[in-house]
Image (cartoon, coloured by chain):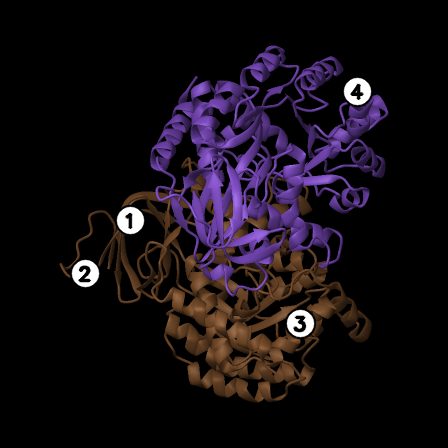
Chain colours: A brown, B purple
């Protein structure tokens, strides 16, 4: 496949009028006047910007099915009266439609890979693979449902080596899993060299609870279990002490910030500047659609930038370039993905139509991507396959109709 | 004109399969199976939601020309080294292109009317009228350029009675205008029954300065001049005392909150809950594109909701329904516009394509509009004229090319 005459975003710079040659699932060459065989697919890149795919580093994809079902409630009644009762009724078929809907949405927003934690991980993996997206997928594990833990290693074995689906291990949190459970999860992750995906220090209540009952913070506690490592994606990390930040940095753990969800649930604002000072690798996630309520990383980037600027009282902090790196390079590092627009990298990328009024005039493109972007992804390519072209994903209407039907069925279901 | 088989958003409720009959610039009837003459224009509303137009209650439209030109800088060097030097070179032709670009963007986001304060107000008014948008337009006035004040009354006289352009009076702020200037502006506004558009209590420095030098807050100071009234759109109002809130409420002044701009410039978070407690009429604005950097009120609604929830520590506060009212009913009240989807109202409305994955499943539409919407406005109608259809505004490419050229010329210009 050849993308012709496109502007290429490479390490923060724009190279104009370049061609991108893709073979199988890799970028082979980026240059001028590249030649291809006659029968190769050609994509006209004029007026478009090629940017590397974004990674949604934390979501619960199937929760798109619950989008708008319950908002604006206090956390406890929201979970206990609305979310959990509905989740208790979810079956594999629901999950499949919810995940497909989430894939549609993410493909529209230029996300090429997501990190998921939810129920029925096999259904998540199958639906994601069918949609052609790349994903790190873990089945959520907590002690209230001990059978979930039993399923983890078989799941990991089943999907290990798949081209698009990378199985991971997903203990819900340090407070919902016993020490024994956490250690078992770690053992499985170590044995398979898998990522661990966990909610960590999300609320003040969680952190205060640990300090009171164990005399250490959730981060310190996980460290005593040897769980902080470069294979850890620690999600939220809103309430961290200076020592927590130091520990996360020293163990090379990755922090996933979810600003929009944290604000909507009033969990607070993560101390990104302190994390950066210690050199922690920070990346971004949208969280699930029931606490966001969309899966746009463009929106996440902007809200993160402006909220952090305001929190630290300086507009010079958290520049567009820095925020863009969180959503791209830092995320690639977290998941060990060879990405970016360069020869040899995975062909996971998007083309953005620059002929949109909110991206005009062409001044600083990175500023536009972070601060102005509100639609305009034209083409999304994952693993060398074009999944969206001119804003259209084949089969989209059918998936939306299916998801709608499952939602209506779900709320009626006993 | 007849919009057929559309879902109609009326007072927070959805009426399915209705027709909307529009004659001249008004909605005449909303009902089922409405009849029209053979030659009437018919718009197919199936799969779409009709919602009343949004009002962008504070912007500097022409600043789209400066979008992305300078970000991530401290306020003083940003203004002094970047924005002001460029603004000093602006001419009427630049303004015209910048405003047209802003109109394109706002039409895309379902905004049917905006409240503008900037240089060369005649150029702003002419470009806006040419684009077919409704706007309250004021020429900015501050003491460094005394000739601006001289132009106010002639401008107001010239545009008074226009169908789309409503002239207003725009003293920049209580700190950039002398008491004499403010009183002259008030006199003109009173004589013509015009709105007053002012930046007020935006930064802590501004408020502290007033308290130190005058012994009263900027709000209290304006009150001594008799400037707080229902014809006042007081923009920002980030740093308010309880007494300021009480005064604004008692005088029936309107407050325009610009959360995104306030965060990006690190001005702070407005005390919306205290304002609401006192019963102040609050509406929303995007501010200009150099401090936002887009003009989307959908984004503004979401960021306002989640930032205010977090600031007041309860996710139950600032519900989607409440935030939607700020962008619609409260804004109509501020500007005395007879709007909403009902017989007799102005035909200023949008059709939203509901067949977008981020708006699926159909649960709570208002929640989707506030929390999930990220593109999908299909049709925008202003004053009974269709300005955008299926996401396309005729002449769009030409305007973007023109704006691009003006920007390039501007940065080169001596």
Picture coordinates of residue A250, whole percent (x, y): 61, 64
Q: How far apart are the alpha carbons under marks 3 and 2?
A: 51 Å
Q: Are marks 4 and 2 on the same chain?
A: no
Q: Chain of mark 1?
A: A
First in sequence: mark 3 vs mark 2: 2
Q: Are marks 4 and 3 on the same chain?
A: no
Neighbour class for label 1 at 10 Å: few (<14), some, many (≥20)?
many
| Element type where label 2 sits in the image | loop
| Element type where label 1 sits in the image | loop
Task: Please tell me whether mark 3 or mark 2 is closer to you in this view.
Answer: 3
Residue beneath disc 1:
A45
Residue beneath disc 2:
A40
Neighbour class for label 4 at 10 Å: few (<14), some, many (≥20)?
few
Q: Are marks 2 and 1 in contact (CB under 8 Å)?
A: no
| Element type where label 4 sits in the image | loop
The quadrant the N terminus of chain B occupies is top left
Q: How far apart are the alpha carbons under marks 2 and 1?
A: 15 Å
The quadrant the C terminus of chain B occupies is top left
Neighbour class for label 2 at 10 Å: few (<14), some, many (≥20)?
few
The answer to whether any part of residue A194 appears in the image is: no
Q: Are marks 3 and 1 on the same chain?
A: yes
The answer to whether any part of residue A387 appears in the image is: yes
Picture coordinates of residue A191, whole percent (x, y): 51, 83
Tell me which residue sits at (42%, 45%) in the image. B36
Q: Which mark is residue B225?
A: 4
Q: How far apart are the alpha carbons under marks 4 and 2?
A: 73 Å
């Amino acid at each position: 496949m050849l993308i012709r005459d496109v502007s290429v975003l490479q390490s923060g710079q724009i190279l104009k009028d370049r061609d991108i040659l893709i073979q199988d699932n890799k970028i082979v060459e980026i240059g001028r006047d590249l030649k291809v065989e006659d029968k190769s697919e050609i994509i006209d890149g004029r007026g478009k910007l090629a940017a590397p795919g974004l990674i949604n580093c934390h979501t619960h994809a199937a929760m798109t099915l619950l989008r708008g079902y319950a908002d604006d409630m206090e956390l406890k009644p929201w979970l206990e009266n609305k979310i959990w009762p509905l989740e208790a009724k979810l079956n594999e078929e629901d999950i499949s439609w919810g995940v497909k809907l989430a894939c549609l949405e993410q493909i529209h927003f230029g996300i090429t890979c997501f990190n998921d934690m939810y129920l029925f991980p096999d259904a998540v993996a199958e639906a994601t693979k069918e949609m052609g997206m790349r994903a790190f997928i873990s089945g959520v594990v907590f002690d209230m449902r001990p059978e979930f833990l039993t399923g983890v290693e078989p799941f990991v074995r089943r999907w290990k080596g798949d081209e698009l689906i990378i199985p991971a291990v997903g203990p819900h949190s340090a407070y919902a899993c016993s020490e024994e459970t956490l250690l078992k999860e770690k053992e499985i992750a170590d044995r398979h060299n898998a990522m661990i995906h966990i909610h960590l220090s999300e609320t003040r209540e969680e952190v205060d609870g640990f300090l009171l009952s164990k005399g250490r913070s959730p981060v310190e506690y996980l460290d005593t279990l040897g769980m902080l490592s470069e294979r850890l994606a620690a999600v939220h990390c809103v309430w961290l002490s200076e020592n927590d930040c130091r520990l996360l940095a020293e163990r090379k753990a990755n922090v996933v910030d979810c600003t929009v969800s944290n604000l909507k649930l009033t969990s607070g604002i993560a101390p990104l500047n302190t994390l950066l000072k210690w050199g922690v690798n920070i990346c971004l996630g949208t969280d699930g659609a029931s606490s966001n309520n969309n899966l746009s990383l463009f929106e996440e980037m902007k809200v993160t930038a402006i909220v952090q600027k305001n929190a630290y009282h300086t507009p010079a902090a958290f520049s567009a370039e820095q925020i863009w790196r969180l959503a791209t390079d830092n995320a690639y590092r977290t998941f060990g993905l060879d990405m970016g627009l360069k020869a040899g990298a995975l062909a996971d990328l998007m083309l953005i139509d620059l002929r949109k009024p909110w991206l005009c005039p062409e001044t600083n493109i990175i500023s536009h991507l972070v601060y102005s972007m509100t639609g305009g992804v034209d083409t999304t390519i994952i693993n060398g396959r074009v999944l969206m072209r001119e804003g259209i994903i084949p089969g989209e209407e059918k998936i939306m109709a299916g998801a709608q039907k499952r939602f209506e069925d779900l709320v009626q279901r006993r």
